[in-house]
Amino acid sequence: MSTTLELLIRAAISIVVIVALVRINGLRSFSKMAGFDFALTVAIGSILAFIMTSTSTPLWIGPVALVFLFALRHALALMRERFAWGDTLDNPPMFLMYEGEILEPNLRHTRVTRAELIGKLREANALDLSQVRAVILETTGDVSVLHGDGVDDLLFEGVSWGDVPARD
């Protein structure tokens, strides 16, 4: 069999396996809701790239590795739910700004620069810092900007104050 044909067959089998695993595992298969989700998504992409470019390993290795990673992701999600491992597997979300005040110690702690924070405020159309209720660095690395007249306290549930004293 030619190398090109073998790579095409490997790619086709891998895509079919990934689609089947996503159907079995659900929509969260490629989410980045938690750090381990992101890490496993990158690992799946790496395995897919390896499968599609390597003819030196047996054809079955790639699909087996993909099944293992999807099973690991599922097992970690179950353990996270059952044993409350969220804090162990993920960094908690952290306030970078609260009630218009930039929390400099938390910027240093999270290695977010002031310029990056200001950029996120602009992206969120925050026009007046006094209207910014909070800026939170999420577990996924995304930055949430909450601005307006008020905010429901439920949105602050589980958010860490990091290196600054908690505010009321």
Image (cartoon, helix red, strand yellow):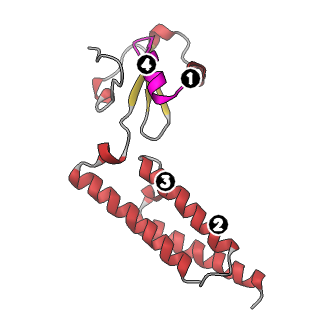
Q: Quadrant of the C terminus?
A: top left
The residue where tag 4 is placed is: 105
> Mark 3 is on which residue type?
Ala
Marks 3,4: beta carbons within 8 A: no
- Tell me residue 29's x, y (percent): 45, 59
The residue where tag 2 is placed is: 49
Note whether 52 is above or below 94 in the view shown: below
- Tell me residue 77's x, y (percent): 33, 56
43 left or right of 154?
Answer: right
- Tell me residue 48's x, y (percent): 60, 68
Note whether 10 is above or below 125 in the view shown: below
State whether residue 134 appears in this view: no
The residue where tag 3 is placed is: 39
**Picture quarter containing residue 56?**
bottom right
Please tell me the numbered disc located at residue 113: 1
Q: Nearer the viewer, mark 4 or mark 2?
A: 4
Q: Residue at x 48, y 23 (%)?
A: 108
Marks 1,4: beta carbons within 8 A: no
The answer for how far apart the CA atoms under marks 1 and 4 are is: 11 Å
5 left or right of 28?
Answer: right
As helix, strand or loop, the secondary structure at mark 4 comes to helix
**Picture quarter containing residue 146?**
top left
Answer few, some or many: residues within 10 Å of disc 1's Cα (few below 14, many 20 plus, some between 14 and 19): few
The mark nearer the N terminus, 3 or 1, is: 3
**For this rendering, which residue is in front, 19 or 68?**
68
Q: Give the magenta part as a residue range.
A: 97-113
